[in-house]
Image (cartoon, rainbow, N blue to C red):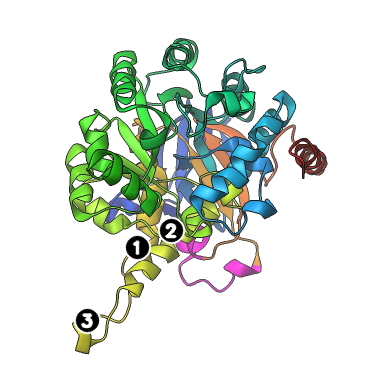
Amino acid sequence: MSILIRNAAAILTGLRGAGERHAGPDLRIDNGIIAAMGALTPQPGEQIIDARDCVVYPAWVNTHHHLFQSLLKGEPQGLDLSLTPWLAATPYRFRAAFDEHSFRLAARIGLIELLRSGCGTVADHNYLYYPGMPYDGSAILFDEADKLGLRFVLCRGGATRTRQLESELPQALRPESLDDFLSDCARLTARYHQAAPDAMRRVVMAPTTPLYSMSPEELRTCAREARRLGIRLHSHLSETVEYQNSARERYDRSPVAFCGEYEWLGKDVWFAHLVKLDRDEIGQLGATGTGIAHCPQSNGRLGSGIADIPALEAAGVPVSIGVDGAASNEAADMISETHAAWLMQRARRGELARPRALGGDSEGGADAARIEDVVRWGTAGGAAVLGLDAIGTLEVGKAADIAIYKLDDPRYFGLHDIAIAPVASGGRPSLRALLVGGRVVAEHDAIPGIDMAQLAAQAREAVATLQRRSGV
């Protein structure tokens, strides 16, 4: 089937350099692939999508999320806490309250929120697993993404150890055995994983955090088993100074050096956060091609800091963007996340500015990140980190994962450069259409089969149930 996107006002491609913008104004899609770009003539029987006054981007690629947290937004007990106490106050306190229905509803809400921001690929770091779990959360996540037509990467989290005695823990907080964790990763890989560069489904091995979730030798075993299975590795790292404290006190080395010792660095590995790094760690990440999922809003909300993305990228680190869980980021969508990434990198560099009397040579950091950089991180960068080489950019021969934004809100009126609007102006632009693999999965801000009023009512009911079950 052929689709012609016509008369786009601006196109950002996700590419570097001279190719980061394309004059268009048209894109032709044949059998799910971008077949041509330029001034094109409609063909007989071709479906037309009118993109007049619209901006066209590659569909966003979200490389780090916790979808089950979509029912934990703004939870009061954790709202003003930093990472470690927040974990106890919110996500871990509520995890036993989730059942199959609430887990499925949370996944659906999170995926819809992402879809409406123009996101076509979601990598979810799900760590809600425990012995004797009465439902298959992995199957639910794949099913919900499939219903919406999204590409989905399951980062199968979990832990084999905890900081408390197992006998004192409720069932939903108990760790798994290494054998159970590895066997489930193998099961999921056999059932769902697709190796193709335009895969709709992927599986990743993703212990929740290297320093706390497994022993060092177990981490090495996981790395080797993942590579035997042909899947990637993912986890959290260096989100706060406590990672540095723990690694140096327990292992007498930095968190990145620790990961390297146990085979957790390489082009098939990416970490969320990487906020607290020294110069040697940045160099080691770059030298090994280890990637980052930059999560600026969550890092800001929890007071963790701002990752030095320009330094990481200059060192050779593949950069992508993740929204993280909605329990630490009350707007878990790619528009608000990229807007925050753009502003926070500038603020970070500006914070380092000093007067000339103290050796300074600038007054700010407005050159730290361009809109085109942020678009590249959130599209091509995400595709590279996930190994989905057929998506992430708008160019002939790539899969047609395309977001078309209609800028009909006053916040976009008066712009001199309409191409930057979705990232620079913030908010959420109206979604004229979202295509994934050439299939239209949303049009005119609507998703087929989704009743937003009903979804909102279900969310309110589910929040009340979770609060009751957790003793709020």
Real-space Cα distance between discs 2 and 1?
A: 8 Å
Q: Which residue is mark 3?
A: 360
Label pair 2/3, CB-CB below 8 angstroms: no
Asked if the stretch drawn in magenta spans residue 418, the answer is: yes
N-term mark: 2 or 1 = 2
Secondary structure mostly taken by the magenta-highlighted segment of the chain: helix
Is 98 on the left or on the right of 253, as rendered?
A: right
**Which circle, 3 or 1, is nearer the viewer?**
3
Q: Identify which amino acid the numbered label 2 is placed on.
A: Ala
Q: Which residue is mark 1?
A: 369
N-term mark: 3 or 1 = 3
Front residue of this view, candidates 288 and 278: 278
Q: Position of residue 313 (x, y in %)?
A: 26, 51
Numbered disc 2: secondary structure? helix
Front residue of this view, candidates 370 and 326: 326
Q: Quadrant of residue 190?
A: top left
Q: Quadrant of the C terminus?
A: top right
Q: Which residues are magenta?
A: 410-424
Front residue of this view, candidates 89 and 308: 89
Numbered disc 3: secondary structure? loop
Q: Is residue 275 above or below residue 384?
A: below
Q: Which residue is mark 2?
A: 341
Q: Position of residue 161 (x, y in %)?
A: 45, 27
The residue drawn where x is 64% and y is 41% is: 70
Front residue of this view, candidates 273 and 49: 273
N-term mark: 2 or 3 = 2
Q: Identify which amino acid the numbered label 1 is placed on.
A: Ala
